[in-house]
Amino acid sequence: MDQKINNKQQKGSKVAGVSADCASCPVHHAANLKKLGVDMESWDFVVALAGNPNTGKSTVFNALTGLKQHTGNWPGKTVTRAEGGFEYGDNRYKLVDLPGTYSLLATSLDEEIARDFILFAQPDVTIVVVDASRLERNLNLVLQVLEITNRVVICLNLMDEADRHQMKVDPRRLARDLGVPVVPTVARYDEGLEELLAAIHEVANGETLAKPYQVKYDNPKLDRAVSQLVTQIEDAFPQVPNARWVALRLLDGDERIIKAVVDGELGELTYTRDDLEGASVSHVSNKSGFAQ
Ligand SMILES: Nc1nc2c(ncn2[C@@H]2O[C@H](COP(=O)(O)OP(=O)(O)OP(=O)(O)O)[C@@H](O)[C@H]2O)c(=O)[nH]1
Ligand SMILES: [Mg+2]
């Protein structure tokens, strides 16, 4: 309980002192989310729901938010976005269902939307829903998400399917190897969701310290190029939390990220008070997404 109060106080003091180092403060954060069409006014934390297609994301989404949800389109796109909310402990959470993707390389509109949300909106927690019976294929996306953010909870879903195929999946070992919480679930039958909520809550409140696994490329030339670029990216955009990932994408010739660097979009993660005061707020009833 003390921990929660402390977190709130810390957040409050950061809000009061919006300044050059406001990159991690909630007001700044809200502005990023607003830009992407998420109203943060009545919520403490934003949680993104990512995962491969057909892994049970919507089942988890429905279980956590009830059926009261907003659906609309992603701003400027014809892809549907569902968002809802839930309350857990002392906190209100907004849950955003991302399109199902196998990767975050932005080679399709769905991948671009999922990637941009995790990168630019910096959700407080990203849940990656994983099919326990197809772990190898699903880990590709997990590793990519871990390169962008360490605020991750793995929802190891379809455990019943893994059992049915006599596959032994060890959530503890996976958590140790990946360096982030892993919660086994059978979302269709509401199994494991309480534990999932507890893990989300701990990551959101900074009670879980993640040490995410990072892919090693074992290539000295690449390592040198990455570390040179990381220095330059950190100089230009001191608030970017994942310079290594940005560097790797630049080396890969990722046009979207090159554009974000050239246009300074990455730098927009730093908001000034003027930016914030200029931002209009669209109101969404804070009850509208709540489970009964
Ligand atoms: N056996 C089993 N089925 C599940 C589980 N979770 C979800 N399902 C089923 O899997 C199917 C796909 O679930 P969805 O929640 O629609 O999956 P999704 O990830 O949202 O799918 P897309 O949005 O199409 O990517 C549905 O028939 C669910 O009932 C589970 O833990 N076990
Ligand atoms: Mg779905």
Image (tube, grey):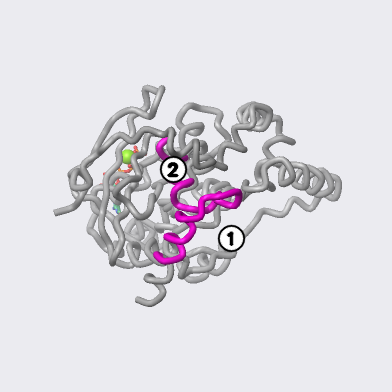
Q: Which residue is mark 2?
A: 52
Majority secondary structure of the magenta segment?
helix
Q: Height in image: 1 above or below 278?
A: below
Position of residue 173 measured from the top left corner of the image (x, y, whole percent): 52, 70
Residue located farthest toward the bottom when viewing the structure as drawn:
2
The kind of secondary structure element at disc 1 is loop
Left or right: where 82 falls relative to 121: left
The residue at the point 49 percent across, 58 percent down is: 14
Q: Is the CB of the residue bearing disc 2 within 8 angstroms of ligand 1? A: yes
The kind of secondary structure element at disc 2 is loop
Q: Is residue 22 magenta?
A: yes
The residue at the point 56 percent across, 53 percent down is: 146
Q: Height in image: 234 above or below 101?
A: below
Place residue 54 in its image quadrant.
Answer: top left
Q: Which residues are magenta?
A: 8-34
Is residue 104 or residue 95 the one in the foreground?
95
Residue 168 visible in image: no
Is residue 10 or residue 130 the one in the foreground?
10
Q: Is residue 57 magenta?
A: no
Q: Nearer the viewer, mark 1 or mark 2?
A: 1
Left or right: where 250 falls relative to 35: right
Marker disc for residue 212:
1
